[in-house]
Image: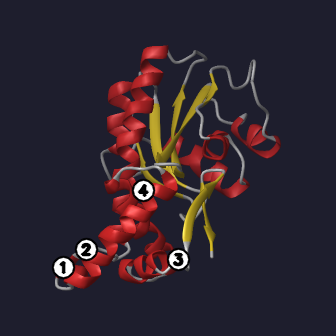
Amino acid sequence: MRQHDQPAGRGVAAEAVLAVAPVAGASVSTLGGFLSPETIDASDDTIARVDELQFDLGEGPCWDAVTTGRPVLEPDLRGRPGRVWPAFSRAIAESDDVAALFAIPLQVGPVRIGAIDMYDVRPGALAEADLLRTIALAAELSRTVLRQVIEENGLGEAPLAARPRSRRRIHQATGFVIAQLDVSAADAELLIQARAFAEGRTMAEIADDILTKRRRFTVQGGEFEEER
């Protein structure tokens, strides 16, 4: 059974999740690493509140999904919980609408950027086919979400279009990141852009750091680490 209260988000990401998973509600959020905790999109106020509790308390399924890089599945959150989060478990027990809760990590290459959260009003496991479809969707949404966050904060490609040298340097640095993180060319460039966003610098400046070997990307626990 699905329910749709007042939308709490600002996009279609949550609706995409509901199209592949038979749950009551879903959200897409950023958290961990270089992105601040934020709900990007939510199908209803209930799942938005679930996100808010996890952000405020610093614990819950979405945090575990980002930390481990694996889905966190709680088909019977109150009756037979697989995990207990001291503060979050107490807080969510007050909600009669959340009986099952599932979190799927969002990541670009090896870098984890957030999670999909889903809830249902009755206890019950996700079917394997539904879980696999949601995991596949998470791979697509991860890039979309990261690009959206970067664009909304004003770090786009336009200023670099008139600077061929900068673009060449970025392409060269992309090759280094591909080798360092074992990602596609598109993901490598997106991660350079994300690093520039996180530091308030340009992609060209980050590229110069990479090419002069002042910086090397590695990943530990799904988060950027840099060897200098």
Question: Which residue is rendered at x = 43% and y = 16% of the image?
Answer: 129
Give the residue type at disc 4. Answer: Ile
In the rendered image, which quarter contains the C terminus? bottom right
Left-right relation of 214 to 164: right
Name the N-terminal-most of marks 4 and 2.
Answer: 2
Q: How is the image coloured?
A: secondary structure
User: For mark 3, what is the residue?
Assistant: 213
User: Left or right: 76 with respect to 113?
Assistant: right
Indicate which disc residue 140 carries: none
Separation of marks 2 and 1 at Cα, in angstroms: 7 Å
Q: Nearer the viewer, mark 4 or mark 1?
A: 4
In front: label 2 or label 3: 3
User: What numbered label is drawn on residue 161?
Assistant: 1
Q: Which mark is residue 157?
A: 2
> Which amino acid type is marked by label 2?
Glu
One can see residue 10 in this view: no
Q: Which residue is mark 4?
A: 178
- Residue at left 62%, top 20%? 75
Callout 2 touching callout 1 (CB < 8 Å) = yes
Q: CA distance from mark 4 to mark 2?
A: 20 Å
What residue is drawn where x is 55% and y is 69%?
216
* Secondary element at tag 1: helix
Residue name at image x 65 percent, y 49 percent:
54
Say if mark 2 contacts mark 3, CB within 8 Å. no
- Check disc 3 and report its element: helix, strand or loop: loop
**Front residue of this view, candidates 47 and 202:** 202
Q: CA distance from mark 4 to mark 3?
A: 15 Å
- Residue 42: horizontal and vertical position, in percent? 43, 46
- The disc, 4 or 1, on the residue closer to the chain's N-terminal end is 1
